Image (cartoon, rainbow, N blue to C red):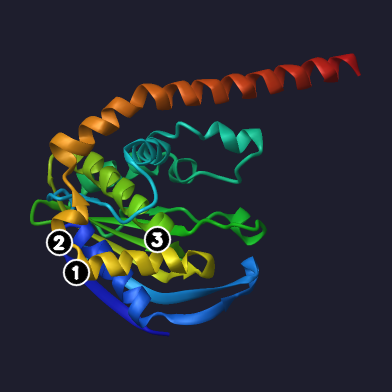
Amino acid sequence: MTEHFVTGKTLPDAYHGAIYALWMRGSDVPCPDWNTNQKELSVTMVVEEPLAEPRISRLFVGGPSDLEQYRQEMLDGILDFEVERGNWKYTYHQRIGGQVEWVIRELQRNPDSRRAVIDLRDDDDFWIDSPACLQNIQYLVREGKLHCKVLFRSNDAPKAAFMNAYALIMLQQRIAMALGVFVGSYTHRANSFHCYEKDYAMMKGYVRRMLTDNDSDLTYNYLDDWDEQMEDAKPAIAEKVRLLREDYDLERTNDFVQGVTL
């Protein structure tokens, strides 16, 4: 199985390189669990300066509101109640749990530690249809910088990888701030970096744009552009979550009343 390494100064640099490598060098293989085929490559993507501009790729599915909601889902658990509701099997935030606090304490205890690992795999993953794709996250403080290394067993290249990486870099920044150190490199390894057959046209379009567009046409700055749009999206996201919670509370009330009646 082919292994490919991509290094970029910024997140878009590395992400675009990984997308290009998958399309040009990936193998076409069956994906029987989802009754389809896929293009697949093992990828290690290194971002040297995760907070450097331009920080946002134009080649991903979504906009500022989608990216802000996903950031809040992973870092703050705004939709964790969907697990209890039965709509989701898990969330990454739920799996991470209190491990962030442990990582901070461990790196405060010993900045040279190699033990600051967040493990997301759970016993339930042996029995559910969609086990967690993100497996673990390791943090290392070296020369005053917090480096982050993540492992995905499986990663949907055009529909998930950029948002995954963006949110994980935001988590890295949060931990670095708690430790009082700078943000170092971000390394994103996906054993199966893939694109499903139904998304081949999307991937082909991404690659065509990489070959024909200027770099400035493939990216946005986060500061003074997307940060403001993502901030503006917060009230609508909060209202969306509030309505979902209201629906869930109503469901629980109706179930309780029905149970009492029976």
Query: Is disc 2 in contact with disc 3, using a CB cutoff of under 8 Å?
Result: no
Expressed as whole percent of the image width and height from the top left, the position of residue 69 reads 39, 36
- Residue bearing mark 2: 214
**What kind of residue is marked 1?**
Thr
Q: Is residue 262 shown above or below 136?
A: above
- Residue bearing mark 1: 7
- Residue bearing mark 3: 158
Q: Which quadrant does the C terminus fall into? A: top right
Comes first in the chain, label 2 or label 3: 3
Q: Which of 203 and 136 lies nearest the eye of the viewer?
A: 203
Q: Which of 166 and 157 lies nearest the eye of the viewer?
A: 157
Quarter of the figure with residue 63 = top left
Residue drawn at point x = 49 percent, y = 26 percent: 241
Give the Cα separation between the discs numbered 2 and 1.
Answer: 19 Å
**What kind of residue is marked 3?**
Pro
Could you tell me which secondary element the residue under label 3 belongs to? helix
In the displayed orientation, state which residue is furthest to the left: 143
**Is residue 242 in view?**
yes
From the viewer's perspective, tell me whether residue 118 is left or right of residue 240: left
Q: Which of 42 and 137 lies nearest the eye of the viewer?
A: 42
From the viewer's perspective, tell me whether residue 14 is left or right of residue 182: right
Q: Which quadrant does the N terminus fall into? A: bottom left
Residue drawn at point x = 24 percent, y = 67 percent: 210
Residue drawn at point x = 41 percent, y = 39 percent: 98
Could you tell me which secondary element the residue under label 2 belongs to? loop
